[in-house]
Amino acid sequence: MRSFNPAAAGAILFALAMPSHGHAQDQAYLKRYGGDWEGGGRVQIEQLPKPVDVSCETAGTVETANEFKLAGECSAMLVLSNDIGAELKVDPKTGEYSGVYTGSKSGPATLLGTRNGDRLELEVTWNKVIYDDDTARMTIENEGEGQFLMTVTERIDGEDVVVSDLTFERQGG
């Protein structure tokens, strides 16, 4: 079974808990990602010429007031499957968020970013070059209404290309 590009669906969920400066607000924002989620959308897989549809199932838990964990699986075309996971922490003094994404075929990736309102703005640093470099931009928007949107942008052939565009919905209330 081939695994797919981590910049695609694998990286999607890994900084879900990266809120902004403000400890109480950060805690409330982190709680938005707790529970079970299902989602999907279009993902560019490095080995394929066109984007494919993917589906993902994840479970999020708030471990402490400053730490979030996510674990799940994404799949595409009935033959591609990838376990995904992330551990993220926020520094309440600086508002900086850092973490590690696991599940990429390139190895663990680092996550670093901030929150601006309901929107997370993150940098993913891969363990090796994927497409043109070893970084990607991730944005995640969650207004607290049981849904979040996630986009990953990579530099490919000198141009910014959206490689993952997904929507997730909370399951079970």
Image: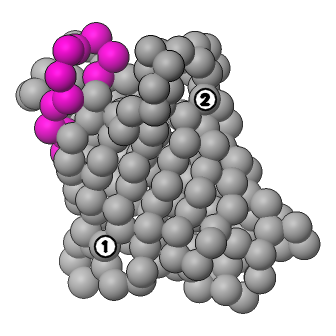
User: Could you tell whether 153 is left or right of 90 in the image?
Assistant: left
Q: Position of residue 69 (x, y in %)?
A: 56, 57
Is residue 129 found inside the magenta-colored segment of the image? no
Q: Residue furthest right?
A: 93
- Position of 158 relative to 69 (above/below): above
* Amino acid type for the residue under numbered disc 2: Thr
161 or 1: nearer the viewer: 161
Does the image show residue 5? yes
Disc marking residue 147: 1
The residue that label 2 is drawn on is 135
Is residue 49 found inside the magenta-colored segment of the image? yes
Q: Position of residue 8 (x, y in %)?
A: 36, 33
User: Could you tell whether 16 is left or right of 56 in the image?
Assistant: right
User: Could you tell whether 97 is left or right of 134 in the image?
Assistant: right
The crowding category of the residue bearing disc 2, from other C-alpha atoms within 10 Å (few below 14, some 14 to 19, many at least 20), is: many
Q: Which residues are magenta?
A: 45-55
Does the image show residue 9? no
- Position of 14 relative to 119 (above/below): above
123 or 146: nearer the viewer: 123
